[in-house]
Image (cartoon, rainbow, N blue to C red):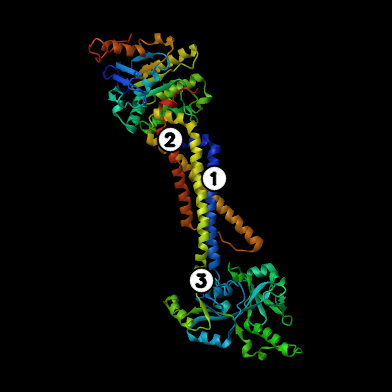
Amino acid sequence: MALTDLAIVRRSLRARLFSTCVTALTVGVAVALMLVLFSMRDAGRQAFARGSGNMHLLVSRDASPMVAVLNGIYYANPPARPIEWAKYQQIAASMPFAFAIPTQQGDSYRGFPVLATAPEFFSDFEPNLGEPWRFAAGRAFEKPFEVVVGARAARETGLRVGSEIFLTHGIAQSRQLGQADAVAPHVHREFAYTVVGVLEPTGSAHDRALFTDLTSSWIIHAHDRRKLTDPSIRTTTADDLLETDRLITGIYLRVASRPGRDATALLPAAFDALRRDPTITVAQPVQQIDALFRIVSNIDVIVLAMAGVVMVSSAISIMLALYNSMEQRRRQVAVLRVLGCSRPRVFGLLVTEATIIGVLGAAAGLALAVGGALVAAGALKNAIGLVVTPVFAPEVTLAVLTGAILLSALAGIVPGVMAYRSSVADHLKPLG
Amino acid sequence: MPDTPAGQDATPALRIADLRFRYPGARPTDPWVIDIAALELAPAEQALLTGGSGRGKSTLLHLVAGVIDLLPPNAGRIEVAGRSIHALRGPARDAFRARHIGMIFQTFNLLHGFSALENVMAALMFSDIPAREHRARAADLLASLGIERTDAAPERLSVGQQQRVAVARALACSPELVLADEPTASLDPENAAVAMDLIQNACRTRGAALLCVSHDPAMAERFPRRARLDELHAAHLRAAAPGLAAHGPAKGGGAWR
């Protein structure tokens, strides 16, 4: 058994334990910051990518495809211009779609948007690709005036299976209420809905919504229309509906896939065919989400650049810590050289020491980031019911850790060169 | 035991010839700090070099150890165990020093944070001695020098024991030559005598030649061969003046008494 270079480095790190720990912690914080930023970026992108699920195309009469996606999938605002039922039937029949689900927005419950739709919304549409809807309690709606509540809406309103609610016409938001010219929200008092199901969280905007069937939505609006002409009317049924009452605001489309063939091959043709109709707006949600990310990617770059600066500054602190210890070290270096340690080996000792600080820091950073993310995710879930899954992509994590260790090794070069060039003869003499 | 016992091999432990040295940056008109025509140590021979401080004693030892480079206009030849140490470059010279030269310092220069045993092992780790032998070799050496607490940190040992660890470290690789730089300067006369006994006996037992530099006059009687550094210079100059064989070998002669 012999003494190794690593043993010498270990002794050196231990001799300056405080400095070692503080410097490693500096690296650790930088690594953790970097990992969390990457993780947040990925988690944010994932969260945003949720919601369109297995839908290929979204049709609406919004001004642009981007607005169509923001309204239709993220419930930004209720689409203003409706699509007539006949138009929907024409579009749905124009091609062999896997599904063509009509949706209608406009009503709300305590600020949460209500989506009136068809039963296929639960049976055919998947909010996340490969992840169908799952019910935390109850079932999908089967007849008019039944409502299914999204996970977050249920959590914040306290609605449970069996609750009775009244919907509000329009989205009643406190901001709107404060404005004098805002249309006063109107509660559809005549029609009570029964909650028949509560959904599991999907991590998408759908968690904030309530879902009911189109017919009941048409009925309550037809009732309003009829009361304008005859205030004595007590009730309205499906039989009273006119063709002009049957309005929707969007269509979720999925192109039919032939057995053994990728449906996306048919998608461009379907997209082009629908776009030839100037009265509708057709959006490919995936493209719109990509476009959205291109807009925010500048911010991304700035954030990552900041993290990079933090990283470099932590490398500088390693260099500084070793540099400051060089005065104490020169005698030891001189003694090692007299004992036969070569200059390259002395250089190697310093670089190894810097690298080990980097490795310790990287490990601390990883622990900090993973621990911190788990705590943060738990807190977010408890506080606001937001499901954020910390994502540490292996390749990104590996790159950050490797980068930190390499930078640390680089930081050892300056003190290493100092040790390399340090005069042996000058540092063997007695002190003083 | 020495690798090349005295008597069988006549290769001197140290041979210096025509050595002239000035520090870098000195003017060409400045006197040489070191100017030695010839100096030789037979295997296991012990010699004392005296001279006031600042006369280049340490510089000579550093030149012999090869930790100072001998670059033009400096010139000369320094052979340790038959090898010209300045003909070796970089890591090769370091490896040679590890194996063939031991150094003892006034302040011991033990490594902090390393145990007594590890201090000796540190000398072995840069040599070509097989790694598996290091621990046993260091332990044996310390035991033979009377150190029992081999795992103690040097700063927890007495000064005398630290001295022993330093001697053990210098002898760890069984070098042909040990260089001692003012080994007793920080000791009182009584302890100095004990320390010198230790160093001289240890070198003798292990067959290492010893070149000791000191300005302590009490050292003189311990060494059959001794010289003053300035006299070495002067002898050289005297010899040169009449135009005689100025650079001829002066083994046992010249300024050596």
Residue sitting at x 23%, y 11%: B243
Residue where numbered disc 3 is placed = A288
Q: Earlier in the sequence, mark 3 or mark 2?
A: 3
Q: Name the element at disc 2.
A: helix
Q: Name the element at disc 3.
A: helix
Q: Amino acid at mark 2?
A: Met
Considering depth in this image, is A248 or B48 the residue closer to the camera? A248
**x and y, in percent, of residue A331 in the image:** 46, 28
Q: Is residue A298 rendered to the left or right of residue B38?
A: right
Q: Is residue B128 rendered to the left or right of residue A247?
A: left
Same subunit, labels 3 and 2: the answer reads: yes
**x and y, in percent, of residue A302 in the image:** 52, 57
Residue A260, above or below A388 = below
Task: Please tell me in which quadrant of the rendered image residue B25 appears.
Answer: top left
Residue where numbered disc 1 is placed = A26
Which of label 1 and label 2 is nearer to you? 2
Q: Earlier in the sequence, mark 1 or mark 2?
A: 1
**x and y, in percent, of residue B133 in the image:** 38, 31
Residue A327, above or below B29 = below
Q: Amino acid at mark 1?
A: Thr
